[in-house]
Image (cartoon, rainbow, N blue to C red):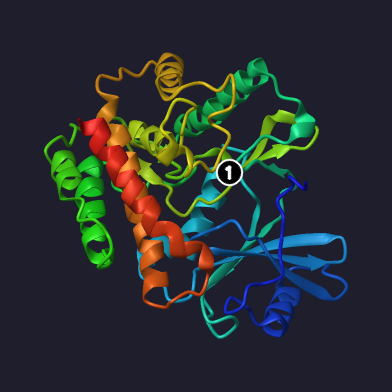
């Protein structure tokens, strides 16, 4: 099985105008040789990502999806600026080459990066790694170390002080995600009213602000093919902003389905967080708190926030499928995930 970041033939309905892209890039990026070949990275469910091959050079093109509903979540110029700034102090991001808002080329704005070669870890660790429980534990710590390193970046020093508004961040997030869910709800979706009310009643006071990734999980990482404990790139920065680091950790832990979770949650697992030796959510939070000196009084709020935010993201994607804005059949079953994750929120709330 290929555990590198795989590509597929471009999906029907998601094609780009290769002739226009080819001409545009050759005018702006020197040294592109040979016929351009276009492939697609299949794993993203939000922005669309393509591999452009020019001989032995490989570039990546990112664009928003067709039929976008959540426009603020697909701002390519913002994502380009985030990568450009973060790269100055945090080397684990792709190198950006250019951005354009000229929609005459492919019908939308887009940006280009160099491709980072690495292994993409999905549901399971590659068997050839031969991971023992001790190896799994070490991988967990490296995963958290990369998140902690990001949270230590001085956003002013990398000129990202205008990336977000830290003051009132928690309240805006809760109220914003609640509103997004209401707007994206379909007739077959739960109302999530109890969860939304619970979160609104428990919005925390102000905390320190830092650059947060917003979607930090194992399957958004590329690891060194020769050293699986070396995370060489963090991908998918569309949700990055300035905000509460514990809310970022809550987002990560929302994806962290562990071995003793019920069958409903385990069926949603997208990363090997249940493997023998992987830390539990409580252990992950404790390690983060110890390494950063952060006092974590009530992580349930942050976890429910993270899980509910995931509910909204999935519902927004499902909304596009439900209304015929995308033909990607992967999205048809997302309503089941929405229902299961609402149950998870209610279980944490008690």
Q: Which of the pair 184/212 is nearer the observer?
A: 184
Could you tell whether 196 is left or right of 7 in the image? left
User: In x, y percent, where is residue 223?
Assistant: 69, 37
**Whether residue 33 is situated above or below residue 220 in the rendered picture:** below
Number of numbered callouts drawn: 1
Local SS, label 1? helix
User: In x, y percent, where is residue 238?
Assistant: 47, 55
Residue 162 showing in the rendered view: no
Residue at the image position 29 percent from the left and 47 percent from the top: 165
Q: Which of the pair 151/334 is nearer the observer?
A: 334
**Whether residue 116 is situated above or below residue 305 in the rendered picture:** below
**Corner quadrant of residue 227:** top right
**Whether residue 67 is situated above or below residue 114 in the rendered picture:** below
User: In x, y percent, where is residue 323?
Assistant: 36, 76
Residue 292 showing in the rendered view: yes
Residue at the image position 46 percent from the left and 22 percent from the top: 280
Could you tell whether 225 is left or right of 107 in the image? right
User: Disc 1 marks which residue?
Assistant: 219
**Corner quadrant of residue 289:** top left
Residue at the image position 57 percent from the left and 45 percent from the top: 220
User: In x, y percent, where is residue 153?
Assistant: 48, 33
Could you tell whether 166 is left or right of 313 in the image? left
């Amino acid at each position: 099985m290929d555990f590198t970041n795989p590509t597929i033939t471009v999906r029907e309905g998601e094609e780009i105008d290769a002739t226009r892209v080819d001409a545009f890039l050759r005018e702006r990026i020197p040294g592109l040789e040979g016929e351009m070949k276009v492939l697609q990275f299949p794993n993203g469910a939000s922005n669309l990502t393509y591999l452009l091959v020019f001989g032995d050079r490989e570039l990546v093109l990112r664009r928003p999806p067709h039929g976008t509903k959540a426009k603020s979540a697909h701002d390519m110029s913002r994502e380009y600026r985030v990568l450009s700034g973060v790269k100055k102090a945090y080397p684990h991001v792709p190198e950006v080459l250019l951005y354009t808002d000229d929609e005459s080329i492919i019908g939308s704005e887009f940006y280009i990066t160099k491709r980072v070669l690495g292994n993409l870890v999905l549901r399971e660790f590659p068997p050839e790694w031969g991971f023992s429980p001790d190896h799994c534990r070490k991988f967990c710590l490296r995963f958290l170390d990369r998140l902690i390193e990001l949270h230590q970046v001085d956003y002013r020093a990398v000129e990202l002080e205008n990336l977000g508004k830290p003051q009132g961040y928690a309240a805006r997030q809760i109220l914003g995600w609640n509103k997004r869910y209401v707007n994206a709800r379909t007739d077959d979706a739960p109302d999530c009213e109890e969860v939304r009310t619970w979160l609104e009643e428990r919005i925390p006071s102000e905390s320190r602000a830092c650059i947060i990734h917003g979607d930090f999980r194992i399957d958004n990482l590329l690891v060194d093919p020769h050293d699986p404990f070396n995370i060489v790139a963090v991908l998918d920065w569309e949700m990055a902003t300035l905000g509460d680091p514990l809310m970022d950790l809550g987002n990560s832990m929302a994806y962290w389905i562990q071995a003793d979770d019920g069958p409903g949650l385990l069926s949603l697992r997208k990363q090997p967080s249940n493997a023998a030796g992987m830390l539990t959510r409580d252990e992950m939070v404790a390690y983060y708190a110890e390494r950063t000196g952060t006092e974590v009084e009530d992580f349930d709020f942050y976890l429910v926030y993270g899980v509910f935010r995931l509910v909204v993201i999935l519902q927004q994607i499902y909304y596009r499928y439900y209304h015929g804005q995308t033909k990607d059949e992967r999205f048809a079953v997302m309503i089941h995930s929405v229902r299961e994750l609402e149950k998870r929120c209610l279980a944490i709330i008690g």
